[in-house]
């Protein structure tokens, strides 16, 4: 009897001692819906990727997810709003490398957020392959054709983008600096409108996300003339990179990832990372992305942090050395 009582008492003591760790191991109770703020236009490549992931998360977690497109000032409006959101796990941020690692150097007077420390990385979602594209009726067939024509007719060749500070804007200005030409920037209200402008021959060229280009490639309304990455893209191996076509050191890539605010409860962050990792590594989701013209990019929080820091340093140097302007 005494022995049993002693054992019960010991068990109670151990349970009490372990209570904090047991409590912390419990799943966070999320409310519904969880809002994901995306400082980019609906229909953009990033928007497509984020909606694939949030739909899968909603199914896995049995919670509604709402993607809110918060546009304005090249992403700065959405960035500020996401940084100020309550860190309770009910509002997440889907942010791309332009907003996190380029805008702070391009518009330092307007970016009031320390993008490297203000957010907790959850997971990488997708890399967005970018090609230089022209209307199918264009006489421009290669990057060299584009360079020659731009130098022959200065200030007459225009490139479209989804707005000032957008990924297309950065890719275009990087091209101007590295190719020593002057394409004239024409910002549209979103990448979808810019893509349509090229397909309808309203503008001569655009650094275009593959996901937006695909429907117009199928209709033979646009032509790809160069890939912005360092190696040829597996879906279009016949399209040479800009580096191969003489634009030395040109290597532009764009990615989108999911973040939470600094100060989010540890249990909520752990659960979000676990669930999102399962989604972005799911072969079905990855297959959907590939079909849509996106490259799966399932980075862990640690990998994502390293990429952000490396990109931040890289773009700081590129923008300074090439004197890239936010106009």
Image: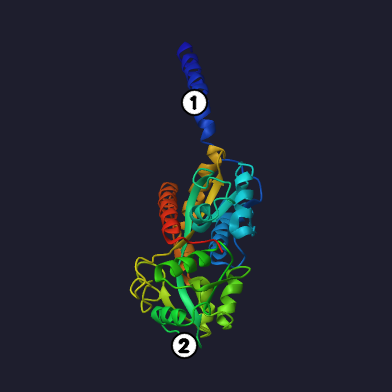
Query: 29 or 301: nearer the eye?
Result: 301
Circles 2 and 1, Cβ within 8 Å, touching? The answer is no
Closer to us: mark 2 or mark 1? 2
Relative placement, left or right, of 67 versus 283 is: right
Of marks 2 and 1, which one's residue comes earlier in the chain?
1
Name the image colouring.
Answer: rainbow
Give the percent coordinates (x, y) of residue 4.
Answer: 47, 16
Give the percent coordinates (x, y) of residue 314.
Answer: 41, 55
Q: Is residue 292 visible?
A: no
Mark 2 residue crowding within 10 angstroms, few (<14) / some (14–19) / many (20+): few
Q: Residue furthest top?
A: 2
Q: Secondary structure at mark 2?
A: loop
Q: Secondary structure at mark 1?
A: helix
In the rendered image, the quadrant that contains the C terminus is bottom right
Residue on which disc 1 sits: 18
Query: 302 above or below 39?
Result: above
> Measuring 53% from the left and 49% from the top, which residue is drawn there?
259
Q: Is residue 20 visible?
A: yes
Query: 37 or 2: nearer the eye?
Result: 37
Mark 1 residue crowding within 10 angstroms, few (<14) / some (14–19) / many (20+): few
* Image quadrant where residue 229 sits: bottom left
Q: How many marks?
A: 2
Relative placement, left or right, of 30 versus 296 is: right
Residue on which disc 2 sits: 139
Label 2 to label 1: alpha-carbon separation? 73 Å
Query: 90 or 327: nearer the eye?
Result: 327
Q: Residue furthest right?
A: 32
Give the percent coordinates (x, y) of residue 225.
Answer: 43, 79
Give the percent coordinates (x, y) of residue 30.
Answer: 62, 44
> Measuring 36% from the left and 79% from the top, which residue is drawn there?
238
Q: Which mark is residue 56?
A: none
């Amino acid at each position: 009897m005494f022995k049993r009582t002693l054992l019960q008492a010991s068990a109670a003591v151990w349970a009490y001692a372990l209570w904090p760790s047991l409590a912390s191991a419990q799943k966070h109770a999320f409310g519904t819906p969880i809002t994901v703020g995306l400082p980019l236009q609906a229909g953009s490549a990033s928007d497509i990727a984020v909606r694939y992931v949030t739909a899968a998360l909603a199914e896995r977690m049995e919670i509604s997810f709402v993607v809110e497109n918060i546009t304005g000032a090249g992403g700065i409006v959405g960035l500020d709003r996401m940084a100020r959101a309550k860190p309770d796990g009910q509002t997440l941020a889907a942010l791309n490398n332009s907003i996190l690692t380029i805008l702070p150097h391009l518009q330092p007077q307007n970016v009031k957020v320390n993008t490297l420390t203000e957010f907790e990385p959850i997971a990488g979602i997708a890399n967005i392959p970018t090609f230089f594209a022209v209307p199918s009726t264009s006489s421009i067939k290669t990057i060299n054709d584009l360079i020659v024509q731009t130098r022959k007719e200065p200030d007459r060749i225009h490139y479209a983008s989804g707005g000032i500070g957008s990924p297309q804007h950065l890719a275009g200005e990087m091209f101007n600096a590295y190719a020593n030409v002057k394409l004239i920037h024409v910002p549209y209200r979103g990448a979808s409108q810019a893509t349509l402008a090229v397909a309808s021959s309203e503008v001569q060229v655009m650094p275009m996300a593959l996901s937006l280009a695909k429907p117009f490639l199928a209709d033979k309304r646009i032509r790809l003339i160069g890939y912005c990455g360092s190696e040829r893209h597996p879906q279009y191996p016949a399209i040479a990179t800009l580096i191969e076509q003489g634009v030395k050191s040109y290597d532009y890539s764009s990615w989108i990832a999911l973040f939470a605010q600094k100060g989010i409860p540890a249990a909520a962050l752990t659960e979000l990372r676990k669930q999102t990792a399962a989604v972005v590594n799911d072969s079905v989701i990855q297959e959907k992305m590939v079909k849509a013209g996106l490259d799966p990019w399932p980075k862990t929080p640690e990998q994502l942090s390293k990429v952000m820091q490396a990109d931040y340093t890289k773009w700081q140097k590129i923008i300074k050395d090439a004197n890239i302007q936010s106009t």
